[in-house]
Amino acid sequence: MLRVGLTGGIAAGKSLASRRLTELGAIVVDADRIAREVVLPGTPGLEQVVERFGPEILTDAGHLNRDRLGQLVFTDPDARADLERITHPLIRTRTEAMVDAAPDDAIIIHDVPLLVEKNLGPDHHLTIVVHASAEERLARMVRDRGMTEKAARQRINAQATDKQRRASADVWLENNAAPAQLRREIDKLWNDRLVPFEHNVRTGERVRRPELLTVVPPNPDWPAQGARLTARLRRIFGPEALAVEHIGSTAVPGMPAKDVIDVQVGVRDLSVLDQPEWRERISDGGFPRAEGEWWDLVRGDGGTVRARKHFHGSADPGRIVHMHVREIDSPAWRLALLFRAWFTTDAEAHLEYRALKRQLVGRGLTATEYAKEKEPYFERAAERAEAWAKRTEWRMPTPR
């Protein structure tokens, strides 16, 4: 089963996307529809809302007058919080029941207008944002919904900003053109990413890095991708993860790299994660574990330290991930964070590593050969990185 969050600003075209995904075979869980259902006449939800806000929020027929209620809560944060305390648990229970009733191979689309505002992205394998410019959305609201321009602007300004939505989006769908264009993009997304992603989650298949070596220029979106991945992993691991960090070259500003996001999860006791229920939980979250035993080798003055780790990939065909699960404060855990800080801060080290990458790429190596050829450099560089750490009084980042 694949769980996908779908959101977008008011009048951006989220409903169009939802309809097309339904036509393709997705099961859409519409948060707005559920929110209306839990306050229908005769429900405990409506009874509690009336108790809090008074009978004046009802129509003559006994239904909730949503416009009147909206006027009460739109400009009053306390009133809005009270409404959410009543409705959100009811919505959550209904949503969970719908998901539990879905077949194992379902692609669940959770259509949530306030997904970004409520920080619900990490609860999903993937987040889709449908976007249209503010001017286009304003025109649609005035033309199609009969709203005044002032009221439309207020609604737009009350929601998340484009910057906030971009930070949350694994998939960004523009909808300023004709509806047919958005439908074509959704069809491609469905066939190329969502369907194989669901299959990989269900079967525990990880997406592997291609052996054809490609080192690309720094991508300004890598930090945001790393942030989304680490947020998801914190939800999956819960308190078992003492720290989750974006590491490797994609975590170093300005560093060319293979388009692979490396993340490091620090745990107190790795053996806990050997339990079948943990392996299943992490795999169901979209990060299948690689078979076999995996070890870190860290060489130092006292000899070589050999420590076991878990290695996971991603089930997402649109984003290759290497996840290293290590016991926190182990030498390899510390060294990954030290190298990230050193290459970020020390200009000489940064340029030296860039030059090494360029030289190795020029030799026509495979991705595996490329990684192997860098090992002697890191063995030598570790001593210099440690000297830099001592000189600058570098400290390990606070676990997060």
Image (spheres, rainbow, N blue to C red):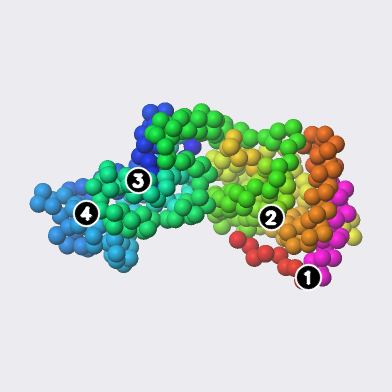
Q: What label sits on residue 368 in the rendered view?
A: none
How far across and down, in percent of the image, does residue 282 sit? 58, 44
Q: Residues within 10 Å of mark 1 (few under 14, many from 20)?
A: few
Amino acid type of the residue that numbered disc 1 sits on in the rendered structure: Thr
Q: Residue at x 10, y 48 (%)?
A: 61
**Three-letter code, disc 4:** Asp
- N-term mark: 3 or 2: 3
Amino acid carrying mark 2 in the image? Pro
Alpha carbons under labels 4 and 3: distance apart: 18 Å
Q: Main secondary structure of the magenta part?
A: helix
For the residues labelled 4 and 1, the Cα–Cα distance comes to 60 Å
Q: Name the residue tied to disc 2.
A: 253
- Does residue 318 appear left or right of residue 154 in this picture? right
Distance from Cα at disc 2 to Cα at disc 4: 48 Å
Neighbour class for label 4 at 10 Å: few (<14), some, many (≥20)? few
Rendered residue at 42%/40% (across/down): 175
**Which residue range is magenta in the image?**
374-391
**Mark 1 and mark 2 in contact (Cβ < 8 Å)?**
no
Q: Report the residue at 83% width, 49% height from top.
A: 355
Query: How far separated are the C-alphas under marks 1 and 3?
Result: 51 Å
Question: Of discs 4 and 3, which sits in the foreground?
Answer: 3
Q: Position of residue 135 (x, y in %)?
A: 38, 49
- Residue that label 3 marks: 11
Give the mark nearest the N terminus, 4 or 3.
3
Residue receiving disc 1: 392
Q: Position of residue 373 (x, y in %)?
A: 85, 42
